C-alpha cells in the first residue's frame, strides 16, 4: 500500500516539475519527448499535469479581485499583490502566451501509433485520448487518433479496450472484416482463423461487417459473440447469461496473466497456453486431450499446468527445452 | 486550438481547483484510503483534460463532484467484487452534488484570503519567485537577474513552491462551513478488497 501512496506523491511531484517548466520556458526536443512519454504512460499523469497547471492558474485567479480588496500582509517585507493592477495589464501578454505554450503540449496527438507484443507478453498502454488498450500475447494493434474518429486496427491477436468517453470521436476497432464501435465502454476483441470474437465487459457496442454498416447489431455488457468472415458463419454465443459477469471476467483473465478453466478439455487449455509460450505443450494421447479440467493457471508457466494434468489424469510428462510432452503411462 | 486549451487550464484553475480540497475532504470523511482519493482526483482531472469545451459548464463545483462520482462508479465496476460500502458512498456523492446550495459558494474575498494564506505559507525564496512570475509576470531570466540566482535555481524554487501549494490543497480540510472536524473519523471502516 505504501508503495502506491509513494507513487501518487511522485506523480504529483513530476507533474509540478513539468507544469513549472512549461510555464517558464519552451521545452527542448528531448524534454518534449520525455514529457510525451511520461504522459502516455498513465492517464493519471495527464490528470496530474492538468491539476498542476491549473494550480498555477489558480494563484493568478486572486488577482482581479485584489484590485478592490485590502490585501493581507505576508511575513515578508513586501505586501503581496503590490503590483496587482500592473499584473492585470500584463496578464494578456506573458501569462497568456505561457498558457498557450502549455496548451499545445497537452493536446492529444495523432501519430499513427503501432503497438505490439511478443509471445507471452501482455502490455497495457494508455492512449493519448485517455483510453486504455491491453494487448494479449503475440498481438499487433495500429492506433490512429483522428479528429473525427479514433481508428484502431487489430492486425493480429487479441486486445481489450477501455474507451474514454468522447461522443464527437467514435472509437472504432477493425478486426478483419469486423467493425466495432463504442463511445465510452470496455470490450475485448480476438482474431481467430476465419473470424473474430467480441466480448463486452462494460456498456454497449455496435458491430457490423465491413461494407455493411447499415446492418449494425448491438452487444451489451456480459455479451460475447463470434463473427465469422462469411456472414453465414456468424454465430452469436450471446448471452453467456447476461448476469454472469464472472464468466466474462474469466474470458479476460489473461490481462492478469491468468487462465481460468471451468471444465474445458486439456486440448483446449493446451492450445490456449501455447499462445503464450515458446515452449509448447504437446499432448500425444487423444484420451488425455479429452479430459476436462477445472483450475486457475498462470499463462506463463506451462510446466505447472502440465504437472497438474499429470496429477489429475495420470499422464506421463517428459520435457526438453522446446517442448513438454504429455503421454500415456 | 491552443487558445481553447489555455482557456481550459484557466477555467480549471478558477472553477475546479478551488473545490478540490472540499472534494478530498468529503472523500476522506467517507474513509476512503489516501491512495484511492489521489486516484479519484487524478482520474477526475484526466476527464476534465479531455474536455474540448467548458463554456457549457456553469457550476464547476457540481461538475467536479459529478465527475468524481462517475470516476468512482467506474472504479467500483472494475473491481471484481463489488463493495457494497463503495456503492453507498457513490450514491451519497450524488446526493451531495444534487444539492449544491448557494451558501457553498465562496466569495471572491474568501477565495483571495485562501490563496494569500497558501502563498504566505511558502518559504521566502519560493514565494518571491512565485510573486515575480505569477503577479509581475516576468520571465525566468529576469527573475534570475533580479534575485541574483541562476535560472536553474529559479526553476527549482518554482517547482518547490508549486509542490508545496499542491500539497497544501491536498491536505486542506475543505472550506465548507458544514465540513468541520473531519479529521480522525472512522477511517478504518473502509474494507479493503483483499484479492
Image (cartoon, coloured by chain):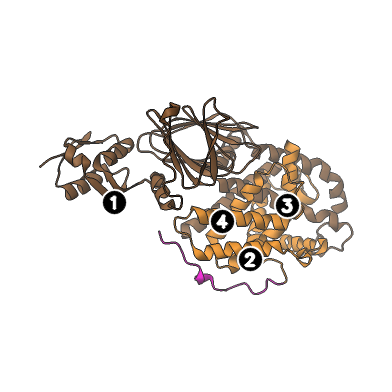
What's the chain of the residue with tag 1? A
Question: How far from the left and from the top, in percent, is residue B158?
Answer: 68, 50
Mark 1 lies on residue: A295
Q: Secondary structure at mark 4?
A: helix
Q: Which residue is mark 2?
A: B25
Disc assigned to residue A140 = none
Picture colour for chain B: orange
> Quadrant location of residue A191?
top left
Q: CA distance from mark 1 to mark 4?
A: 31 Å
Question: Element type at marker 1?
Answer: strand
Quarter-of-image position of residue A193? top left
**A42 or A83, which lies in front?**
A42
The image position of residue A127, as x and y in percent, is: 55, 39
Q: Residues within 10 Å of mark 2 (few under 14, many from 20)?
A: many
Q: Is residue A230 left or right of residue A301?
A: right
Is residue A252 in sight in this rendering? yes
Name the colour assigned to chain A in the rendering. Answer: brown
Q: Are marks 4 and 3 on the same chain?
A: yes
Measured in 3D between alpha carbons, the distance from the residue under mark 2 to the one under mark 3, in whole angstroms, is: 19 Å
Q: Earlier in the sequence, mark 4 or mark 3?
A: 3
Q: Where are the magenta residues, as a range?
A: B178-195
Residue underneath mark 4: B73
Q: CA distance from mark 4 to mark 3?
A: 25 Å
Q: Are marks 1 and 3 on the same chain?
A: no
Amino acid at each position: 500500500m505504501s508503495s502506491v501512496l509513494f507513487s501518487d506523491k511522485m506523480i504529483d511531484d513530476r507533474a509540478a516539475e513539468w507544469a513549472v517548466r512549461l510555464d517558464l520556458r519552451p521545452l527542448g526536443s528531448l524534454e518534449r519527448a520525455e514529457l510525451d512519454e511520461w504522459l502516455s504512460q498513465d492517464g493519471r499523469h495527464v490528470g496530474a499535469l492538468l491539476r498542476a497547471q491549473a494550480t498555477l492558474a489558480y494563484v493568478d485567479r486572486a488577482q482581479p479581485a485584489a484590485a478592490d480588496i485590502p490585501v493581507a500582509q505576508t511575513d515578508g517585507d513586501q505586501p503581496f499583490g503590490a503590483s496587482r493592477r500592473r499584473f492585470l495589464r500584463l496578464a494578456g501578454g506573458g501569462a497568456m502566451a505561457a498558457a498557450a505554450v502549455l496548451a499545445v503540449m497537452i493536446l492529444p496527438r495523432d501519430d499513427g501509433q503501432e503497438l505490439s507484443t511478443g509471445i507471452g507478453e501482455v502490455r497495457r498502454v494508455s492512449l493519448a485520448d485517455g483510453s486504455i488498450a491491453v494487448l494479449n500475447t503475440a498481438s499487433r494493434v495500429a492506433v490512429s487518433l483522428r479528429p473525427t474518429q479514433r481508428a484502431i486496427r487489430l492486425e493480429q491477436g487479441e486486445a481489450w479496450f477501455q474507451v474514454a468517453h468522447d461522443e464527437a470521436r467514435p472509437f472504432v476497432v477493425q478486426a478483419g472484416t469486423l467493425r466495432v464501435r463504442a463511445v465510452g465502454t470496455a470490450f475485448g476483441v480476438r482474431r481467430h482463423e476465419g473470424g473474430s470474437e467480441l466480448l463486452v465487459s462494460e456498456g454497449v457496442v455496435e458491430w457490423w461487417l465491413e461494407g455493411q454498416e447499415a446492418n449494425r447489431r448491438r452487444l451489451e455488457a456480459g455479451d460475447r459473440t463470434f463473427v465469422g468472415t462469411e456472414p453465414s458463419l456468424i454465430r452469436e454465443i450471446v448471452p453467456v447469461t447476461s448476469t454472469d459477469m464472472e464468466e466474462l471476467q474469466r474470458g479476460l483473465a489473461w490481462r492478469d496473466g491468468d487462465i481460468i478453466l471451468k471444465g474445458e478439455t486439456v486440448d483446449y487449455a493446451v492450445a490456449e497456453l501455447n499462445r503464450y509460450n515458446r515452449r509448447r505443450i504437446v499432448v500425444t494421447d487423444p484420451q488425455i486431450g479429452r479430459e476436462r479440467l477445472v483450475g486457475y493457471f498462470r499463462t506463463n508457466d506451462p510446466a505447472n499446468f502440465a504437472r497438474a494434468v499429470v496429477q489429475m489424469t495420470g499422464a506421463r510428462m517428459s520435457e526438453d527445452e522446446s517442448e513438454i510432452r504429455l503421454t500415456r503411462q | 486550438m491552443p487558445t481553447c486549451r489555455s482557456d481550459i487550464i484557466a477555467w480549471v484553475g478558477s472553477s475546479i481547483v478551488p473545490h478540490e480540497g472540499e472534494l478530498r475532504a468529503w472523500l476522506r470523511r467517507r474513509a476512503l484510503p489516501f491512495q484511492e482519493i489521489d486516484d479519484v482526483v487524478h482520474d477526475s482531472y484526466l476527464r476534465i483534460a479531455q474536455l474540448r469545451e467548458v463554456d457549457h459548464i456553469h457550476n464547476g463545483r457540481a461538475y467536479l463532484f459529478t465527475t468524481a462520482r462517475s470516476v468512482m462508479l467506474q472504479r467500483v465496476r472494475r473491481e471484481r467484487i463489488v463493495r457494497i460500502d463503495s456503492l453507498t458512498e457513490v450514491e451519497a456523492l450524488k446526493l451531495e452534488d444534487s444539492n449544491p446550495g448557494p451558501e457553498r459558494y465562496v466569495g471572491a474575498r474568501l477565495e483571495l484570503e485562501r490563496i494569500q494564506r497558501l502563498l504566505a505559507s511558502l518559504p521566502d525564496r519560493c514565494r518571491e519567485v512565485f510573486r515575480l512570475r505569477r503577479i509581475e509576470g516576468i520571465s525566468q531570466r529576469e527573475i534570475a537577474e533580479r534575485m541574483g540566482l541562476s535560472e536553474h535555481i529559479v526553476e527549482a524554487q518554482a517547482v518547490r513552491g508549486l509542490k508545496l501549494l499542491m500539497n497544501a490543497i491536498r491536505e486542506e480540510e475543505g472550506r465548507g462551513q458544514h465540513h468541520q472536524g473531519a479529521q480522525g473519523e472512522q477511517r478504518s471502516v473502509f474494507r479493503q478488497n483483499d484479492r
